[in-house]
Image (cartoon, rainbow, N blue to C red):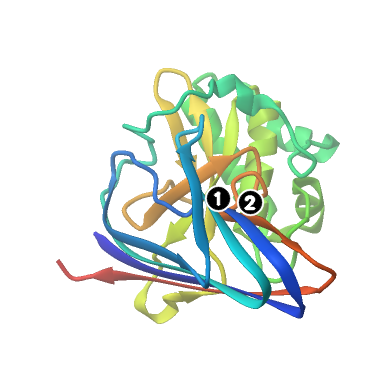
């Protein structure tokens, strides 16, 4: 498939910020299954800073916006050619050892309920089969419901609530996989759904689980599938905050208001 992306993030401040500094993880991963045809990131009045590829293989770009500033727009527009890799991340160069992703964070820490959920996959010897079972268990335990949770909702809280969004599904699967001894990480990116729902409020997210002998394999419990040609992978981290496409800080006493719009469409080849 050839997918087009328009991702616009607008920051507004009730009192002008003295300056804004951001770190972007907004460039599609270099890996099998996706090839960038065109990709441009712009920042209103922004000055591009240093850029580098981190240990996880993600491209990080720094930006600075001199103040005073009351509104900043980060716009992403591009085209990516994709193909189905059955969820397996191939051709992605990184230096971070998989076992580093056995470490829990505040939002992926397993409570007794998450440990009990992970235990339901005990006895499945093949790691790939175990990972698939864990993804199914998470999908069954957490009903997809936009607005049911917040950005800082933990995996344990989402499981107790029984409702959530893709971020909660990813966090819960990561927590359960780590309990089962499988390294797991959070992945941010985009998903093409269909023509009627091309406009989305936010980018998509899923999880990757390390399967010895195979490598990183993606799982999207929210859609009960592995990533295929409808997905564009941006970057990864221990959790949503660690893998966020945009991270930054604004200097000043003002209150920030955020608006995000994402549109992913398929182009006829």
Q: Quadrant of the N terminus?
A: bottom left
Say what secondary structure mark 1 lies in. Answer: loop
Q: How many C-alpha atoms fall within 10 Å of the one at disc 1: few (<14), some, or many (≥20)?
A: many
- Image position, residue 26 (x, y; %): 47, 54
Say what secondary structure mark 2 lies in. Answer: helix
Q: Residue 97 is drawn in which quadrant?
A: top right
- Image position, residue 73 (x, y; %): 55, 73
In the image shown, does 187 or 6 lie closer to the viewer? 6
Question: Which of the two labelled residues, at mark 1 and mark 2, occupies the earlier sequence position?
Answer: 2
- Image position, residue 205 (x, y; %): 54, 53
Query: Which residue occupies 59% across, 27% down?
Result: 183
Is residue 244 something that shows in the picture?
Answer: yes
Look at the picture and state if 111 lies above or below 63.
above
Look at the picture and state if 106 lies above or below 97.
below
Query: Which residue occupies 30% across, 64% down?
Result: 3
Residue farthest along the left direction in this orientation = 269
Look at the picture and state if 169 lies above or below 198.
above
Question: Horizontal placement of 53 versus 175: left or right?
Answer: left
Question: Horizontal placement of 112 versus 212: left or right?
Answer: right
Q: How many C-alpha atoms fall within 10 Å of the one at disc 2: few (<14), some, or many (≥20)?
A: many
For label 1, the residue is 221
In the image shown, does 45 or 190 lie closer to the viewer? 45
Is residue 146 something that shows in the picture?
Answer: no
In the image shown, does 72 or 115 lie closer to the viewer? 72
For label 2, the residue is 169
- Image position, residue 182 (x, y; %): 60, 25
Q: Which mark is residue 13?
A: none
Question: Horizontal placement of 153 versus 186: left or right?
Answer: right
- Asked whether the beta carbons under mark 1 and mark 2 sit within 8 Å of each other, the answer is yes
Query: Which residue occupies 39% across, 55% down?
Result: 231
């Amino acid at each position: 498939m050839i997918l087009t992306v328009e991702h616009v993030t607008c920051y507004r401040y009730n009192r002008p910020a003295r300056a804004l500094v951001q770190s972007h993880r907004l460039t599609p991963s270099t890996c099998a299954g996706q090839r960038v045809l065109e990709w441009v990131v712009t920042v209103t009045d922004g000055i591009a800073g240093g850029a580098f590829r981190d240990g996880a293989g993600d491209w990080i770009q720094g930006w600075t916006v001199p103040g005073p500033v009351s509104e900043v727009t980060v716009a992403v527009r591009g085209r990516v050619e994709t193909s189905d890799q059955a969820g397996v991340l191939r051709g992605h160069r990184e230096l971070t050892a998989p076992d580093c992703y056995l470490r829990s964070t505040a939002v992926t820490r397993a409570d007794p309920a998450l440990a009990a959920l992970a235990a339901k996959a005990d006895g499945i010897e093949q790691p790939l089969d175990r990972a698939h079972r864990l993804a199914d268990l998470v999908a069954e335990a957490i009903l997809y419901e936009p607005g049911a949770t917040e950005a800082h909702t933990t995996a344990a809280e989402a499981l107790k609530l029984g409702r959530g969004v893709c971020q909660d599904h990813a966090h819960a699967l990561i927590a359960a996989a780590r309990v089962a001894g499988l390294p797991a990480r959070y992945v941010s990116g985009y998903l093409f759904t269909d023509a009627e729902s091309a406009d989305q409020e936010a980018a998509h997210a899923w999880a990757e689980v390390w399967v010895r002998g195979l490598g990183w394999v993606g799982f999207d419990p929210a859609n009960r599938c592995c990533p295929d040609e409808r997905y564009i992978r941006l970057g990864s981290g221990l959790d949503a905050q660690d893998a966020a496409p945009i991270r930054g800080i604004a200097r000043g006493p003002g209150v920030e208001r955020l608006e995000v719009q994402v549109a992913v469409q398929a182009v006829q080849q």
